[in-house]
Image (cartoon, grey):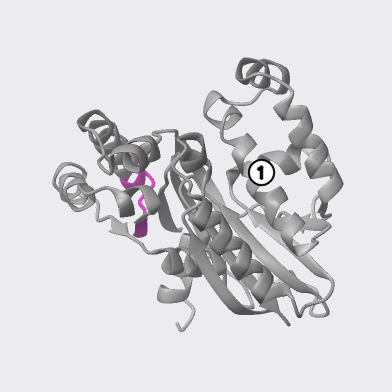
Amino acid sequence: MLRYAAIDIGSNAVRLLIADISRTEEGYTFKKNTLVRVPLRLGDDAFLDQHISDRKVDDLVKTMIAFKNLMDVYHVSKYLACATSAMREAENGEEVIKKVKKMADLELEIIEGQREANIIYSNHIEENLDSKRSYLYIDVGGGSTELSVFVNKVPVASKSFDIGTIRILDNQDKDETWESMKQWVKENTKSLKNVAGIGTGGNINKLFRMSDEKDGMPLSFIKLKGLYNQLNSHSLKERISVFGLNPDRADVIIPACEIYITLMKWTGIKQIYVPKVGMVDGIINLLIEENLVNL
């Protein structure tokens, strides 16, 4: 059995996906074997201090050692470990990478926003799109939001903005970044008719599950706004007890809603599709493309 692993070192959580790769008539596909998520919250340090604290570095190193051990036990043959906006902004990001290499024997790559968007593209959600419609693809993370416009199943524009859930909670989002995002999204969708949204990331996946919509059906703007109002009317403690949210999801889900709702308002999008894929899925697909597709 061929196994690949993806590690996503995000601003809110760190994830490991171990996937079983199998051959099909069309090429290769993968099945999720093991998914581990650890809420390290590196963004709190990175966005407030531009430096990841010794305690968080220590936690990250321990997590990476655990991930490496799991990968060894599962006999993973290839992996890719990507760090996003928190590590991009931390002045000691390169030092942290060296420490992880020394202590856990794992190579980490700090990736730019465009590379992050390209990895998410590797999920090939465009294959399931309606070619008659245009789409705004919205991926909301802890430190950044990646936006892409798809026309006729092809990405025609994409950009990363420093607006994310942890950044908003820490009051580190800037008015001019919001304005820049507004201008970009309006400019790139103004000539398009019948635009739908596509949302990826842990928060929109959770919101979709809470909506009780059937898989494959879109989440309406009205339903998303209703969920937001419902969640926002409860305290953090109540969100954990009433809705059964994890503590590290109960706070970020509010700013995540705000980002999706704002973008949908700016563009007049009434429906958002939630394919339930994310960065780790994209990394696995990228590994397959780089190593297997031409065999």
Q: Which residue is mark 1?
A: 258
Residues packed near mark 1 inside 10 Å, few (<14), some (14 to 19) or many (20 plus) = some
Q: Which residues are magenta?
A: 70-81
Instruction: Name the residue located 34 percent from the left edge and 38 percent from the top edge.
Output: 48
Q: Above or below — where is 38 with respect to 265?
A: above
Percent of width and height locating residue 221: 82, 50
Instruction: Name the residue located 16 percent from the left edge and 50 percent from the top edge.
Output: 98
Percent of width and height locating residue 290: 41, 75
Percent of width and height locating residue 110: 31, 58
Viewer-proximal residue, 104 or 19? 104
Q: Above or below — where is 152 with respect to 130?
A: below
Viewer-proximal residue, 277 or 68? 277
Image-based side of 9 in relation to 240, left or right: left
Q: Quadrant of residue 56?
A: top left
Viewer-proximal residue, 190 or 111? 190
Judge whether residue 214 can be spotted in this image: no
Judge whether residue 219 can be spotted in this image: yes
Image-based side of 161 in relation to 102, left or right: right
Q: Amino acid at mark 1?
A: Glu
